[in-house]
Structures are given as structure tokens and as C-alpha cells.
């Protein structure tokens, strides 16, 4: 009887050994333009004007409110870059949808973060990728541009 319990115990440990790899939280800084040029972006984005970081934009006629979107996608069986791109586009689509429902025609000052300080860049976003999930958090201001 004790040999059977020992065998089950050893098998259980062997199955649990890979779990620390799933717990990783690797930060990535990736290209916004690369994500926007992807087929998924071309198919799914709503077409609102988006301005990242301190990127210049036309004059604001009306500021509606700030918004945020926190999206995650499975990263198993995907590269970190692919999973991050999907999470980024999902978060951007959610921001666009919120902006559209408010009557905004643009989102300005879009920033990303992964739980640390906000990342403000006109060319890159940050993503945290783990063994099971990649996530992107975006914030921005919904506006009506002239």
C-alpha cells in the first residue's frame, strides 16, 4: 500500500514541476505600428483616430472623459509577441468601442502599463506575458477633434 502512495506522490510532483514556468511575467516593449498593420487590426479595429503618448493631433473641440481597458489573452501555444499583439489590439478595440459610444471621434494620450509606471510612447506599448496569459492595460482620453 505504501509503494502505491509513494508512486502517486512522485507522479503528482512530476506533473506539477512545469508550473513555475507558467507563473512567469515577462515584460515586453513592442511596436504599435506593427500591431496596427496586422491583418487582425485591419479586420477588427473600428477606425477611430488614435494618438499614442504625446503624439501630435488636431485641436481638441471637446474632451469627454478618460477611459481604460485591461485585456488578456491566452499565451499557451503562441509566441509572446503574438499573444501581446492580440491583447494590445483587444484593449485598443475596447477603448475604441467605449469612445464611439460616447460620441468621440478620437482617443488621445494613449498609454500602456503592466502594473508598474505608465509607458507613454508614440511608437511602442508594453505587455506582460506569462506561460498562460499575456496582458495589456491601456488608458486614454476620449475627445472630439476639430
Image (cartoon, grey):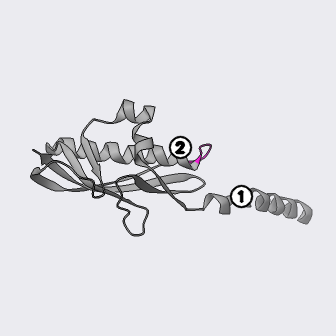
Residue of label 2:
82
User: Picture coordinates of residue 72 (x, y %)?
Assistant: 45, 51
Q: Earlier in the sequence, mark 1 or mark 2?
A: 1
Question: Is there a contact, CB below 8 Å, between mark 1 and mark 2?
Answer: no
Q: Label 1, label 2: how many angstroms apart (C-alpha)?
A: 22 Å
Residue drawn at the location 27% of the way across and 43% of the way down: 96
Which SS type dominates the magenta stretch? loop
**Residue found at the very far bottom of the displayed protein:** 117
Residue 78 located within the stretch drawn in magenta: yes
Q: Quadrant of residue 97?
A: top left
Q: Nearer the viewer, residue 26 or 31?
A: 31
Q: Identify the image quadrant of the N terminus.
A: bottom right
User: Picture coordinates of residue 15 (x, y %)?
Assistant: 75, 56
Left or right: 61, with 76 as reference point: left
Q: Is residue 74 visible?
A: no
Q: Secondary structure at mark 2?
A: helix
User: Picture coordinates of residue 89 (x, y %)?
Assistant: 40, 43
Q: Secondary structure at mark 1?
A: loop
On residue 18, the disc is: 1
Few, some or many residues within 10 Å of mark 1 (<14, 14–19, 20+)? few
Residue drawn at the location 27% of the way across and 49% of the way down: 51
Residue 114 located within the stretch drawn in magenta: no
Q: Nearer the viewer, residue 101 or 124?
A: 124
Q: Is residue 39 visible?
A: yes
Q: Which residues are magenta?
A: 75-79
Left or right: 2, with 33 as reference point: right
Amino acid at each position: 500500500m505504501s509503494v502505491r502512495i509513494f508512486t502517486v506522490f512522485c507522479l503528482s510532483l512530476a506533473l506539477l514541476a512545469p508550473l513555475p514556468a507558467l507563473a512567469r511575467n515577462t515584460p515586453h516593449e513592442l511596436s504599435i505600428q506593427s500591431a496596427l498593420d496586422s491583418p487582425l487590426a485591419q479586420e477588427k479595429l473600428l477606425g477611430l483616430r488614435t494618438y499614442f503618448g504625446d503624439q501630435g493631433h488636431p485641436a481638441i473641440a471637446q474632451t469627454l472623459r478618460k477611459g481604460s481597458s485591461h485585456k488578456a489573452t491566452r499565451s499557451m501555444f503562441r509566441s509572446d509577441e503574438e499573444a501581446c499583439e492580440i491583447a494590445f489590439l483587444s484593449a485598443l478595440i475596447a477603448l475604441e468601442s467605449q469612445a464611439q459610444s460616447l460620441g468621440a471621434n478620437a482617443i488621445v494620450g494613449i498609454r500602456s502599463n503592466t502594473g508598474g509606471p505608465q509607458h507613454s510612447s508614440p511608437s511602442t506599448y508594453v505587455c506582460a506575458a506569462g506561460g498562460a496569459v499575456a496582458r495589456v492595460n491601456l488608458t486614454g482620453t476620449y475627445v472630439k477633434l476639430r
